[in-house]
C-alpha cells in the first residue's frame, strides 16, 4: 500500500513538473532564425506538415514540439492555410492563435482611378509577395482565364486597394478587381437618370472612363458628363483629347499635335462620332456615377482654366473667348476641345 502511494505521488509530481515545463515553453518567446519569419502554409497541409513548415521557415524549435502543441490543444482541425508573420517576442501560443484565427500577414496593391490596363499589369508585376503567374500571358489569354473571352481588358477592373497573402496569384487579384467593377458598374447603372444618351452599361463604362481622364475635379465631373451627353444628343463629335492619346498608345510623347487629331483610329473622337470602341482607363466610383447622373446644363464646350477646374460654354463663340482668356493659344490648337 505504501509502495502504491509512493508511486502515485511520484507520478503526480512528474505530471505537475511536466505541465509546468510545458506551460513555460508555450508562453516563452520562440527562438527565431531572424527577427521576422514568414510562414506560408499551403492549403490541405497536414498538421505535422504545418509544424515542419514553421520550423523550416525559421522557428528554431523541434517540429515535434509544435506538432504536440497543435494536437494537444484540440485546435489542430482549425489551423488555416495562409501567410503568417512571426516576430520576435511571439510565443508558441501566439503561433497557434494566428494559425487558428487566420491572422495572415497581408500585403496590398492599390489601383489608381484613371490607370490603363498596362499600368495595372505593371503595378501587379511590382507588387511584393504576389505570385507573378501572368507575366507570360497576353491580354487576350489573361481575359480568357478570367472568364471574359473576347472582351477588351481596358476599363474592366475597379480601382481600389486589394489585400492579399504572400504567394497569392496575380490572377486572383485581377479576378477580384474584375468582379468589383461588375458590381460597381451595375450599382451605378441602377441609379441612372432618365433621358441618357448612353443606353447600356457598356456605353456608361466607356463614357465614365473618358470623364475620369478629363478631370480630377469632382465638382466638374457631372457637368463634363452633361457636355458629352449633349454632344451625343445632336450627333456632334465628342472631340476629347484623352481618347486620341489612348489610341496613340506608347508612341505618345506627351505632345498632342494637329496631325494626331486628324489621324483616324477607333479611339479618335475628332474623326469619328459617338463613343470610342472600348473604355480608355479604369473609372472610379464617382466617374461611373457622373456618367449616368449628368448635371443639368446646356453646355457643349469646356476648357481648362489652369487651376484644375473647367470653364463651360453653351456656344462656340463663348467657348472661343474662354479659350483665348484661359489658354491664349487658340492658334496652335483646333477651336473645339
Image (tube, grey):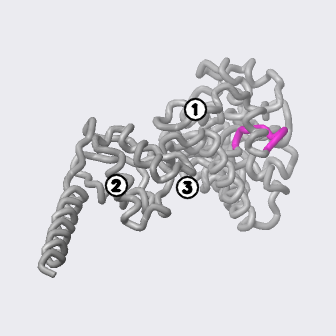
Judging depth in this view, the residue of 235 and 316 nearest the camera is 235
Q: Of the two numbered discs 2 and 3 on the same chain, state the one appearing first in sequence.
A: 2
Dots 2 and 1: beta carbons under 8 Å? no
Q: Residues within 10 Å of mark 1 (few under 14, many from 20)?
A: some
> Could you give the CA–CA distance between mark 2 and mark 3, rounded to whole angstroms?
50 Å
Q: Of the two numbered discs 2 and 1 on the same chain, state the one appearing first in sequence.
A: 2
Return the mark for residue 95: 2
Q: Which residue is mark 1?
A: 132
In front of the other: label 2 or label 3? 2
Judging depth in this view, the residue of 158 and 62 nearest the camera is 62
> Could you give the CA–CA distance between mark 2 and mark 1, rounded to whole angstroms?
28 Å
Return the mark for residue 169: none
Q: Residues within 10 Å of mark 3 (few under 14, many from 20)?
A: few
Magenta part of the protein: which range?
A: 148-155
In front of the other: label 2 or label 1? 2
Residue 115 x, y percent position in the rendering: 60, 38
Q: Is residue 112 left or right of residue 296?
A: left
Judging depth in this view, the residue of 242 and 180 nearest the camera is 180
Residue 184 x, y percent position in the rendering: 66, 58
In the image, what residue occupies the spot 86% across and 49% down?
A: 234
Residue 290: image quadrant is bottom right
Vertically, is 146 above or below 74? above
Q: Of the two numbered discs 1 and 3 on the same chain, state the one appearing first in sequence.
A: 1
Q: Which residue is mark 3?
A: 219
Vertically, is 248 above or below 16? above
Can residue 166 be seen here?
yes
Can residue 161 be seen here?
no
Instruction: Check disc 2 and report its element: helix, strand or loop.
Output: helix
Amino acid at each position: 500500500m505504501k509502495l502504491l502511494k509512493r508511486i502515485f505521488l511520484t507520478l503526480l509530481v512528474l505530471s505537475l513538473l511536466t505541465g509546468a515545463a510545458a506551460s513555460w515553453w508555450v508562453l516563452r518567446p520562440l527562438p527565431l532564425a531572424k527577427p521576422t519569419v514568414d510562414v506560408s502554409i499551403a492549403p490541405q497541409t497536414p498538421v505535422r506538415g504545418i509544424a515542419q513548415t514553421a520550423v523550416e521557415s525559421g522557428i528554431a524549435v523541434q517540429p515535434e514540439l509544435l506538432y504536440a502543441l497543435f494536437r494537444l490543444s484540440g485546435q489542430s482541425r482549425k489551423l488555416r492555410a495562409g501567410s503568417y508573420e512571426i516576430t520576435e517576442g511571439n510565443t508558441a501560443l501566439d503561433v497557434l492563435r494566428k494559425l487558428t484565427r487566420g491572422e495572415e500577414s497581408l500585403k496590398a496593391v492599390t489601383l489608381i482611378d484613371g490607370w490603363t490596363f498596362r499600368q495595372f499589369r505593371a503595378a501587379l508585376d511590382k507588387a511584393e509577395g504576389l505570385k507573378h503567374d501572368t507575366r507570360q500571358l497576353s491580354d487576350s489569354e489573361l481575359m480568357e482565364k478570367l472568364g471574359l473571352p473576347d472582351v477588351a481588358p481596358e476599363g474592366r477592373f475597379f480601382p481600389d486597394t486589394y489585400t492579399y497573402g504572400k504567394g497569392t496569384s496575380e490572377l486572383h487579384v485581377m479576378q477580384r478587381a474584375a468582379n468589383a467593377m461588375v458590381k460597381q458598374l451595375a450599382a451605378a447603372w441602377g441609379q441612372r437618370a432618365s433621358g441618357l444618351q448612353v443606353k447600356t452599361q457598356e456605353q456608361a463604362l466607356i463614357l465614365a472612363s473618358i470623364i475620369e481622364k478629363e478631370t480630377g475635379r469632382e465638382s466638374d465631373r457631372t457637368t463634363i458628363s452633361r457636355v458629352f451627353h449633349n454632344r451625343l444628343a445632336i450627333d456632334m463629335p465628342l472631340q476629347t483629347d484623352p481618347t486620341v492619346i489612348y489610341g496613340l498608345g506608347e508612341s505618345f510623347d506627351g505632345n498632342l499635335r494637329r496631325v494626331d487629331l486628324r489621324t483616324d483610329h477607333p479611339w479618335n473622337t475628332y474623326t469619328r462620332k459617338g463613343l470610342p470602341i472600348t473604355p480608355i482607363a479604369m473609372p472610379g466610383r464617382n466617374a461611373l456615377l457622373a456618367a449616368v447622373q449628368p448635371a443639368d446644363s446646356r453646355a457643349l464646350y469646356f476648357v481648362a482654366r489652369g487651376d484644375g477646374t473647367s470653364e463651360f460654354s453653351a456656344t462656340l463663340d463663348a467657348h472661343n473667348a474662354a479659350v483665348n482668356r484661359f489658354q491664349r493659344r487658340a492658334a496652335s490648337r483646333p477651336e473645339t476641345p
